[in-house]
Amino acid sequence: MCGPPGSANGGWVSGTVAGVLGTGPAEVTLRAPTPVETELRLEWTPDEARLLDEGRLLAEAFRADVPDAPPPVPLDVAVEAARDYPGLARHPFPGCVVCGSLRAPGDGMRVWPGPVPGRPDMLAAAWHVDPWLADDDGGVQTAAVWGVLDCPTGWVHIRTGIVAVLGRHNVAMHQRVAPGQTYVVVARDEGREGRKNWASAGLYDTSGQLMASARATWITLNSGDPRATSSSGESSR
């Protein structure tokens, strides 16, 4: 599932690696970009997991504490916020499977977070769960839930003009997410230091029940990184 060009979405990778540890909260550190269309190896014990590319460590997961979530917003607020999604004007990774501005309906998740009125530290988006995200048990793939909690935490900082990539992701899944339903995802700025940028996120149903929570660390890239492009180009899952 595409994120930055030539590599997989960080949240999707994190959820895939953490998923082998079960349903409890986990934290994943991304050590290197995960290539797409490449055979990789996933190793795990009951308490940790590692994703490798011919011996090179790409990501590692450990059991972790439950992260706090920012408060929910109503669905209509999230829908309206998405109209001002900054990625529609300029997107560093327009082919991203989660938030890519090039994705047509049914192609990608189309989670487009925009600013919440009266809350300059928060973004929100609506997420309608397409059937292709279903798992074998009738729920939603763990990787998809981690993905939807990934990109909004990045846009909290990317909207300021930087280019950043996910470095660490701590997620707890509280309730089962279902295909065909609509949810609200919110993300909140939690500060920055040097190249590190922190944000929290929450996934809620339309009644305001918390489905999943997250805390993410994003790493600022060189501001002249060539991957910072306008919203044009090719997309692929």
Image (cartoon, helix red, strand yellow):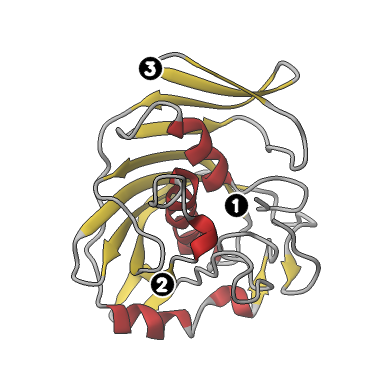
Residue type, label 3: Asp
Element on which disc 3 rests: loop
Disc with the residue nearer the chain's start (1 vs 3): 3
Marks 3 & 2, CB-CB < 8 Å contact? no
In the foreground, 115 or 112: 112
Is 190 placed left or right of 41 in the picture?
Answer: left
x and y percentages locating residue 195 in the rendered image: 55, 44
Give the foreground label among 1 and 3: 3
Residue type at mark 1? Ala
- In terms of image quadrants, where is residue 236? bottom right
Left or right for 158, reference 172: right
The amino acid sitting under disc 2 is Ala
Please state which of residues 159 and 77 is positioned toward the viewer in this rendering: 77
Q: Which residue is mark 3?
A: 47
Q: Answer few, some or many: residues within 10 Å of disc 3's Cα (few below 14, many 20 plus, some between 14 and 19).
A: some
- Residue located beneath label 1 in the image: 164
The span from disc 3 to disc 2 (Cα, nearest Å) is: 33 Å
> Given the current orientation, which residue lies at the most extreme front position?
137
Give me the residue at 44% from left, 65% from top: 129
Tell me which numbered mark, 2 or 1, is placed earlier along the sequence: 2
Q: Quadrant of residue 110?
A: bottom right
* 17 shown above or below 54: below
Q: Position of residue 54 (x, y in %)?
A: 75, 19
Is 75 situated above or below 62?
below
Report the residue at 52% width, 46% height from top.
11
Q: Is residue 196 visible?
A: no
What secondary structure is marked by label 1? strand
| Rendering coords of residue 161 (x, y %) | 60, 66
Residues at marks 2 and 1, CA–CA distance in whole angstroms: 20 Å
Q: Which residue is under mark 2? A: 125
Real-space CA distance between mark 1 and mark 3, rounded to the nearest whole angstrom: 29 Å
Task: Determine whether label 2 and label 1 are within 8 Å by CB.
Answer: no
